[in-house]
Image (cartoon, rainbow, N blue to C red):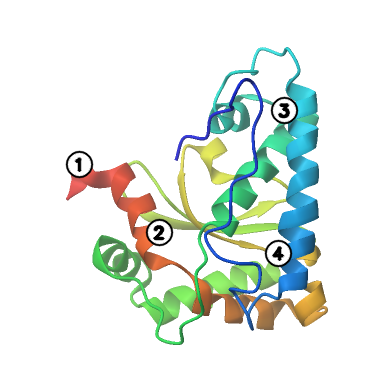
Amino acid sequence: MNILPRNGIFEKTSLPYKLEGLLPVISKETLQYHYGKHLETYLNNLNTLLGDSEFKNESLETIVQNSNGALFNNASQVLNHVLYFTQFQKPSAENKPQGYLKKAIEKAFNSFENFKNIFEKQGISLFGSGWVWLSSDDSGNLIISQEENAKNPITKNLNPILTFDVWEHAYYIDFRNNRAEHLKSLWQIINWDLLELRYTEKHRYHF
């Protein structure tokens, strides 16, 4: 993914589903606030902060990798949310990875079920606000990481593939303070075909 501004302005990424398309996992009301207001705020702040700065025409990824302070926080939250919102699709109880990503998950975590358990535990145990990520290194090996607040694994030269948002506004309307149940429910709406592309487009030379 290489997200570029248009005439110096970053625009909101469209959702690949309707606001009610993720029910019952994520409600329309949650998306109205999370996508409609929280992401909008980060996006507006980012465009204001860019102004005529040295990053004005750079990609979002370049800004996240090279900025700091308020600019980093807002740019990284925009990137985090784009990766988050675009990874979902209509719920399916039989939702599992296939292809190269499946093999990489089984190599790193022994089984898909074990991977899910580890990923959920990392999300549950992250204190305060932040994100839990599945990323790959330069060799295509998979890594799970906790990132506080706005941080994104690309600052560690990793390729982000999957993320769960554990900021409270991501789940409080639907699950109140039950973060664990929210995280467990998200597996039903993951678009594994998209995540396969996020993985293979970065590491095609390994296959």
N-term-proximal mark, 2 vs 4: 4
Mark sitting on residue 1: none
Q: Which amino acid does label 3 sit on?
A: Asn
Q: Which tag is nearer the camera, tag 3 or tag 2?
A: 2
Mark sitting on residue 195: 2
Q: What residue type is labelled 4?
A: Val
Which picture quadrant has residue 7?
Answer: top right
* Residue at (59% x, 81% y) in the render: 185
Q: Residue placed farthest to the bottom in the image?
A: 93
Q: Position of residue 130 (x, y in %)?
A: 71, 56
Q: Where is residue 183 in the image (x, y as percent from the top left)?
A: 62, 75
- Total labels: the figure holds 4
- Up the image or down, 40 lies above or below 92; here it is above
N-term-proximal mark, 1 vs 4: 4
Q: What residue type is labelled 2?
A: Leu
* Closer to the camera in the image, 6 or 71: 6
* Closer to the camera in the image, 68 or 9: 9
Which element is circle 1 on?
helix
Residue at image mark 4: 166
Q: What residue type is labelled 1?
A: Tyr
* Residue at (64% x, 37% y) in the render: 11
Residue at image mark 1: 205
Assess disc 4: are there few (<14), some (14-19) or many (≥20) residues with their C-alpha within 10 Å of its C-alpha: many
* Closer to the camera in the image, 112 or 22: 22
Residue at image mark 3: 68
